[in-house]
Image: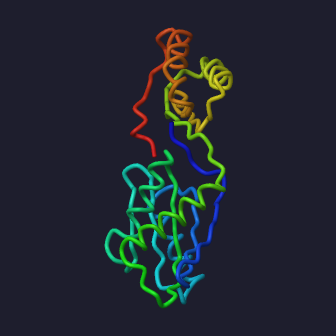
Amino acid sequence: MSFSLACPAHHELVIKKSRFIACVESVAGRDEAQARVAQLKAEHPDAAHVCWALLAGGQSAANDDGEPGGTAGRPMLEVLRHQDLQGVMASVVRYFGGIKLGAGGLVRAYTDAVAQALLSAEKVLLIVQTPLACNVSYALEGLVRREIELAQAQLLGVAHGSVVTLRFALPATQAAALMARLSESGRGQLVWLDCDTFE
């Protein structure tokens, strides 16, 4: 099971006069994470570093932002991994206090800042949605819409042409049962489409 966060959570640590301001929050992907980092840098122009880590499937990333390699981004990413999070970004703004912490001290500081922020974060279960699409005759549109509603699937779009194209999504665990019900009630007149052809 994977989790996301209901809302951003923060924590601040002070270690040997250096301030570590951590934030954990849900983000959709790398573009959103990089926009958030740019925003943090604008909000904290005097900060020495804005390090971050993103756990989001194939878009996962870790950035040390000038700290010694492997002392900030990667340890933060590991904290997210151990919490079974997905689509979550951790960022830590560091104001340097004049005393060097060494590689081990930096790893502990960034790890602790993120771990402490996560202690106050509300986790929400991430339910994987499966997108589906089908073509039906106008006569079957009402029936398909009712089945989609009964399954509590999310209707994503409807297009009316020579046939009706319906796009919808529902939890992956329920997709096969709905497809079987629709195929049976459609009596061979329902055509499933490849969802990769839709944006």
- Image-based side of 147 in relation to 189, left or right: right
Q: 88 or 137: nearer the eye?
A: 88
- Image-based side of 20 in relation to 150, left or right: left
- Image-based side of 8 in relation to 137, left or right: right
Q: Give the total number of marks visible in the rendering.
A: 0
- 159 shown above or below 135: below
Q: Position of residue 145 (x, y in %)?
A: 64, 25
- Image-based side of 155 in relation to 187, left or right: right
Q: Classify residue 12 by image quadrant.
A: bottom right
Q: Outermost residue toward the left?
A: 69
- 118 shown above or below 65: above
Identity of the residue drawn at 57% across and 56% down = 26
- 96 shown above or below 143: below
Q: Position of residue 112 (x, y in %)?
A: 52, 64
Q: 59 or 183: nearer the eye?
A: 59
User: Which colour assignment does the render follow?
Assistant: rainbow
Identity of the residue drawn at 50% across and 29% down = 172
Identity of the residue drawn at 40% across and 77% down = 65
Q: Position of residue 95 (x, y in %)?
A: 53, 84
Q: 10 or 163: nearer the eye?
A: 10
Q: 151 or 63: nearer the eye?
A: 63
